[in-house]
Image: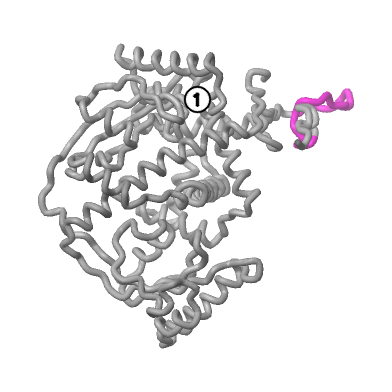
């Protein structure tokens, strides 16, 4: 463990107030300078007052835009600090495992944000400044969000396996899950550490039951979620938005089945902790004509990395193959010679691919292509890919659609549950020292 300097040392290093100064008697007093103190230590890094204050202000603005009443300042500050701790632990893990976001990826993401808001880059900068967010800080935050998404994909999403037996069981026991009915749901999570004692579990349960009582007495759900929820969406009021029953965690789907809009569930136990679910609204029902599914006929070239073949080598090699295809080369012939996938013998042909059949990175890249287009090199857990889309079609595949929908639903459910458990385990093994109460 790297020793953290004392508060006085930090002040001196940063050139901030906090240490006595030797000034001539005639010297004019210096202007006050804000002292940036340490509010938490996360492994070998610190979180400071200024970082915490900035995040608190951002979260407050978000809740205000939603029309959600703000929690008590002290409670809200601690909630934001806990999010910062968990975020810092994830970023540290990403750095330790050489996961990075390059500037080109970051620039493309910011460009999409501007486009989605129908803004030019200058307008986006002005809007951020109006909210008190500097351009460099905004870039750092977007980079962190992309990094955390990639970390989750690598550590959780890409490890999810859905078996044929699970699909059969889902279809047999959830006849109405694919009916088209949707639920607007909000939730609160009181996380329980994996190694929690019986007393700690009892204390967390009592906290959750107290929240339920306050909700049923009429207190605002968003305000209490921002005050007490340990879920990543807690600071935004715990709102999960509209979801089909198949896209809700199994425990939530079972809870909302018998609930009416506006109702709050009893406390629900899961491996991650104690949940409280609110059914905000419900809509839809059995929908006819959902038999059409878009299928993609695609082929790819796979280059696997090893001790000899680095990521840079694989990417460079695929870029060279891509240039050859763009200049008239035959993708199928190149796949036969260069691809490390079993599909190489068929010219890289994957056949007709349904949504959910491939890993997220591959599917996103494939879906972005038009027929005849070739992707840039794409990295997945299997290696590096070059993807070409031959054609697309809408196919009337009732049974296939149901199975694909069931697979996606099970994958999403398992991923949500696995992510909560992974966050809990990461938090449990992270060294954290809180200094907020010492300030």
Establish if 277 lies above or below 438.
below
Q: Which residue occupies 61% across, 67% down?
A: 306
Residue 84: image quadrant is top right
Residue 28: image quadrant is top right
The magenta region covers: 13-30
Q: Which residue occupies 36% across, 41% down?
A: 413
Q: Which residue occupies 41% across, 38% down?
A: 417
Q: Is residue 426 left or right of residue 118?
A: right
Among all residues in the image, which is located at the extreme bottom? Answer: 328
Residue 38: image quadrant is top right
Q: Is residue 383 left or right of residue 240?
A: right
Label count reads: 1
Comparing 265 with 61, the one in front is 265
Q: Quadrant of the N terminus?
A: top right
Comparing 383 with 392, the one in front is 383
| Residue 155 in picture, x, y percent from top left | 52, 48
| Residue 22 in picture, x, y percent from top left | 88, 26
Would you say residue 138 is visible in this rendering?
A: no
| Residue 323 in picture, x, y percent from top left | 48, 81
| Residue 114 in picture, x, y percent from top left | 41, 54
Q: Is residue 17 magenta?
A: yes
How crowded pointer 1 is (Cα within 10 Å; few <14, some 14-19, many 20+) is rated as many
Q: Is residue 137 left or right of residue 439?
A: left
* Residue underneath mark 1: 192
Establish if 260 lies above or below 125.
above
Q: Quadrant of the C terminus?
A: top right
């Amino acid at each position: 463990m790297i020793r953290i300097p004392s508060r006085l040392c930090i002040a001196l290093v940063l050139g901030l107030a906090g240490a006595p100064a030797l000034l001539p008697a005639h010297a004019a007093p210096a202007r006050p300078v804000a002292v940036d103190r340490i509010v938490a230590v996360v492994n070998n890094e610190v979180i400071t007052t200024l970082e915490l204050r900035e995040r608190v202000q951002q979260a407050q603005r978000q809740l205000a835009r939603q029309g959600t009443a703000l929690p008590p300042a002290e409670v809200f500050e601690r909630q934001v600090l806990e999010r910062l701790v968990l975020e810092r632990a994830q970023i540290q893990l990403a750095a330790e495992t050489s996961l990075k976001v390059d500037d080109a990826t970051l620039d493309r993401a910011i460009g999409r944000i501007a486009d989605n808001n129908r803004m030019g880059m200058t307008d986006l900068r002005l809007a951020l400044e109006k909210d008190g967010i500097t351009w460099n800080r905004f870039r750092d935050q977007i980079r962190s969000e992309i990094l955390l998404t990639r970390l989750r994909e690598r550590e959780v999403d890409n490890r999810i396996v859905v078996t044929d037996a699970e699909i059969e069981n889902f279809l047999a026991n959830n006849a109405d899950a694919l009916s088209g009915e949707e639920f607007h749901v909000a939730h609160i999570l009181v996380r329980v550490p994996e190694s929690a004692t019986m007393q700690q579990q009892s204390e967390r349960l009592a906290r959750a039951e107290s929240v339920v009582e306050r909700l049923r007495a009429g207190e605002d759900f968003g305000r209490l979620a921002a005050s007490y929820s340990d879920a990543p969406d807690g600071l935004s009021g715990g709102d999960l938005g509209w979801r089909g029953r198949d896209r809700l965690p199994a425990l939530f789907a079972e809870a909302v089945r018998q609930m009416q809009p506006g109702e709050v569930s009893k406390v629900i136990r899961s491996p991650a902790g104690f949940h409280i679910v609110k059914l905000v609204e419900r809509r839809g029902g059995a929908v006819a004509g959902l038999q059409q599914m878009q299928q993609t006929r695609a082929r790819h070239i796979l280059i696997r990395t090893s001790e000899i073949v680095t990521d840079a080598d694989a990417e460079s090699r695929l870029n060279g193959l891509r240039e050859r295809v763009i200049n008239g080369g035959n993708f199928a012939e190149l796949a036969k010679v260069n691809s490390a996938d079993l599909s190489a013998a068929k010219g890289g042909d994957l056949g007709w691919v349904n949504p959910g059949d491939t890993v997220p990175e591959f599917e996103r890249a494939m879906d972005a292509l038009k027929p005849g287009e070739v992707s840039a090199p794409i990295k997945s857990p299997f290696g590096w890919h070059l993807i070409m889309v031959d054609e697309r079609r809408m196919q009337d595949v009732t049974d296939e659609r149901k199975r694909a929908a069931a697979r996606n639903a099970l994958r999403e459910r398992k991923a949500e549950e696995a992510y909560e458990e992974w966050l809990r385990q990461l938090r449990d093994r992270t060294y954290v020292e809180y200094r907020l109460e010492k300030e």
